[in-house]
Image (cartoon, rainbow, N blue to C red):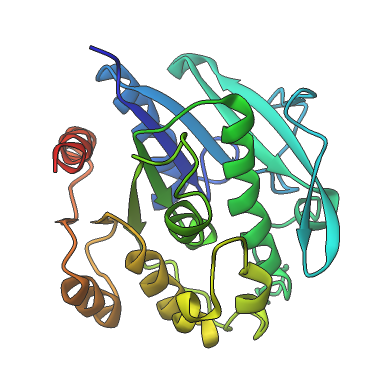
Amino acid sequence: MEKKRILFISQEITPYLPENHISKIGRELPQGIQESGKEIRVFMPKFGVINERRNQLHEVIRLSGMNLIINDTDHPLIIKVASIQAAKMQVYFIDNEEYFQRKAILSDAEGVEFADNDERAVFFARGVIETIKKLRWAPDVIHCQGWLSSLIPLYIKKSYKNDPLFQDTKVISSIYNNEFKTPLNSTFKTKALHKDIDDSDMDLLSEPTFVNIQKHAVQYSDAVIYGCDTINPSIKSFVEEVGIPTLEYQSSEDYIKAYSDFYDTILES
């Protein structure tokens, strides 16, 4: 029997970024899933704080070179890769000089969130999908972690629904409590538009707050995982209203097996 393919799209992964709840799961989960017998691919943004020399990143020329049009402007897509030897795991990085070269992650030294985080989210989501297409690697499950990946469910279910690589793909979104303070740019909805997506498909993004962006991801996901023991009540109520399968928060000792079993359950449903 062919191995099931799990695509992890993570906002943060340690050791490339400082360790926190999301980055620790981003590092441990793919390794654990791979060791359970599944095939994996892992993607994250190439934030400018990542030391390329120390972490031995190098550009993958055959995957780079595409331009993504966002807000009527061409933005070159650069793909880099590095290996976590102890995990026997490769990590692909989505890079672009304008969006991901600054020496910060999502906010400046004063904690002010970047005004173009909306465009960075669009670029990251579309960059991952186009790279997967170039790899010709059809994922059975796409697991999105961190709000920066929140457009992935929409694109997979609308723009790429007829693409043979994604026709049978299930999308799972992990919900965390990593809320940002300032809503994204009010034009986020327009910038996120892509083929086969109507304005009405993105009603929740008319006011792009953290809560609405997470609800929008849930709306187009096949299942949800609660990555924290405390979840915004409004998001939790929306998940219950949508009625999709949900995995409750799992302890650090149990979560890898629980996630693997959940993937199997979603694939069988």
Is 10 drawn above or below residue 80 in the view shown?
A: below
Horizontal and vertical percent position of residue 42? 50, 33
Asked if residue 251 lies left or right of residue 96, the reply is left
Is 208 drawn above or below residue 7 in the view shown?
A: below
Closest to the observer: 199 or 181?
Answer: 199
Horizontal and vertical percent position of residue 63? 72, 28
Closest to the observer: 55 or 164?
Answer: 164
Horizontal and vertical percent position of residue 167? 39, 41
**Residue 105 showing in the rendered view:** no
Horizontal and vertical percent position of residue 71? 78, 70
Q: Quadrant of the C terminus?
A: top left
Closest to the observer: 11 or 252?
Answer: 11
Which residue corresponds to the image point at 33% horizontal and 58% vertical from the top-left? 221
Q: How many marks?
A: 0
Which residue corresponds to the image point at 64% horizontal and 63% vertical from the top-left? 106
Which residue corresponds to the image point at 46% horizontal and 57% vertical from the top-left? 146
Asked if residue 85 lies left or right of residue 232, the reply is right
The answer to which image quadrant residue 136 occupies is top right
Which residue corresponds to the image point at 23% horizontal and 74% vertical from the top-left? 236
Is 207 drawn above or below residue 155 in the view shown?
A: below
**Residue 195 showing in the rendered view:** yes
Q: Quadrant of the N terminus?
A: top left
The answer to which image quadrant residue 153 occupies is bottom left
Closest to the observer: 225 or 125?
Answer: 125
The answer to which image quadrant residue 79 occupies is top right
